[in-house]
Image: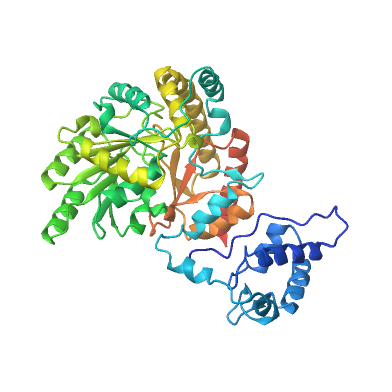
Amino acid sequence: MKHSDPRQGIDWKPDPAIPLSLFRQIEIYIREKITTGEWTAGYRLPPQRVLAQSMGVNRSTLVAALDNLIAAGMIEGRRGGGTYVSGSGWHALAHGAPPNWNEAIEEGWYYPNLPEVQLINRAEFQPGIIRLGTGELAPELMPEDAFNDILRSLSDRSRTLNYLQPQGSLELREALSDYLLTCGIHASPSAILIVSGSLQALHLISVGLLPRGSAVLLEKPSYLYSIHAFQSAGLKMNGVPMDAGGLHIPRLEDMIEGGTHQGHPSPLLYTIPSFHNPTGSVMNDARRNELMSAARAGGISILEDAAYTDLWLDMPPPLSLKARDTDGRVLHMGTLSKAVSPGLRLGWLVGPEPVIRRLADIKMQTDYGTSSLAQEAAELWFAGGYHSRHMDRLRPELRRRRDFMLELLERYFNGIAEWNKPAGGFYIWLKFTASPLSIRQLFHACLQDGVLIHPGFLYDRLDADHLRLSYAYASEEEMERGMQLLAKAARNLLES
C-alpha cells in the first residue's frame, strides 16, 4: 500500500532577490530538510519536472543542486528511477542508523487518499487556482456578519471554556431539537450527539457499530468512495445502482437478500437522498417510502446524510428518511459545513439513545469533545434565528450561480457532453458523450492550466465519463474562464 504520492511538488520557492544563486538556495533547502529529519532515509523526492515546476525554476538549475547533494552522499538515484534520501554513504554513517519511517508509513492500517484526492487537497490552496469542483461555499457566501454578531454576543456573556458533556452542549442539542422538529424529525436532546463534522460521525460509526468484515451498501456513485473511513475499518462497500428516482430498490433488495442467505450480518445503507453528492439528484417521495419498506423487510439500518438538505433552490426536497422512521432504524447525520461554514467543524448525529451513548463514549476517548466555543456559537446560530435568515439570503445567490454555470455548459460543451439541472446542493454531474476522452488526462491537463476539477472516478472507481462540477465556490469570472479552459482541454483530447 503506497501512502504518499511522489508526483506532488513542494510549497517552497527560491528567492531571486537574495544574493545567492538559485541552485545554492535549493541545495540548502533540501539539505536542511534532510539534516532536520523532515526527509528521512528512503524518502522519495518528487520527479525533477514536478520539483522544478513547483519551485519555479528551470530543470538545469534543479539538477545542479541535486548533483551537489548526490556528491555529498545525501541523496541517491536508484535503479528503476527516482531520487531518494540516502540510507548509506558518508552522511548516513555520520548520523547512525535512521528510523525506518517509510516502512512504518507503509504498514499503517489507515488507507491513504487516492493520488488525485491528495493533489486536489494541495492544489486548492495554490494562489490563482480556479476551483470548479470544490464542495464548499465561496468565502463571500458565508455569513460573516452574522457570526461577528454571534461572537460579540459571546464576548458579553459567560463562556464555557471547560469540557462539555459527552454528547455535547445541552443548550445546542436543545436548539437542534427545535430545528429538527421544523424538518419533521422528532429528536429529544438525549438522542443527539454533537460531532466535529460529518467525517467524525462516519469514523465513530465505522468503529463503534459495525464489526470488521461487515457490509456497507451505498449509492453508486457516492461521496464515500472518495474517502476511506469505512474501508480502513475493515468494512466492505457495495454499490447500489441509481436511476432518476434514486436508489434502485429491486437491486437493493437482491443485495440484502444475498447477504442474508450467506450468513452475513445485516448491512448498513449509507445514502444522501437530498441533492446527492456527486450527482445532485433527489430521491423522490415514493422511492423514500419504498426504501423504508425495503429496510424494514430486510432488517437493515440506514445512515442518512442530510448535509445538503437545506440547500434547495427550486423547492424543498421530500420529507427525510428519519422523519418517516418509526422504529429507530435511521441514523440521521447533519452538518453546518455545507450550508454555513466548513471551518466551524460542527455536525450532529440523531439516533436511538443507546447508539448515541455508545458513540459519545468513543468520541470522549478520541477528542474529549467538540470545541466548546464552536458549540456555543452554533447554539446562538440556531436559537437566534440566524440559520433561516441565512438560508433565505443564500438560496437566490446559489440559484443564480447554478443558472450561470448551466449557461456556460450550453455555450461551451454542447455536442460533447450532457448534464443535469440540479434542484439544490452544489453539484452538476457532467457526462462526456464524445469519445475517446481520458478523464484522468483531462484532470491533469486542467491542473496544468490552473483549473481544478473533480473526476468521476473519485466517486466510482470504474467511472470513465463524468466530472463533478460545483457552482458554489468559483466567482462568475473564474467560472467562465475555468469552463472555457476545461472545454478547450476536453476538445484537445478528443481531437488528439
Up the image or down, 232 lies above or below 409; here it is below
Up the image or down, 475 lies above or below 3; here it is above
Image-based side of 312 in relation to 496, left or right:
left
Q: Residue at x 37, y 52 (%)?
A: 229
Image-based side of 356 in relation to 417, left or right:
left
Residue 482 lies in what quarter of the image?
A: top right
Q: Looking at the picture, how far across and down is residue 208, in whole percent?
A: 28, 49
Quadrant (top left, top right, bottom left, bottom right) of the N terminus: bottom left
Q: Looking at the picture, how far across and down is residue 442, in whole percent?
A: 54, 56
Up the image or down, 277 lies above or below 165; here it is below
* Res 2 visible: no
Q: Residue at x 11, y 59 (%)?
A: 261
Q: Looking at the picture, how far across and down is residue 234, in whole percent?
A: 31, 60
Quadrant (top left, top right, bottom left, bottom right) of the C terminus: bottom right
User: By what rule are the colours in the image chosen?
Assistant: rainbow
* Res 100 visible: yes
Q: Looking at the picture, how far across and down is residue 158, in whole percent?
A: 48, 20
Image-based side of 32 in relation to 227, left or right:
right
Image-based side of 30 in relation to 169, left or right:
right
Q: Residue at x 55, y 34 (%)?
A: 138
Q: How many marks?
A: 0
Q: Residue at x 66, y 80 (%)?
A: 93
Q: Nearer the viewer, residue 316 or 413?
A: 316
Which residue in the rendered view is the most extreme toward the front?
162
Residue 260 lies in what quarter of the image?
A: bottom left
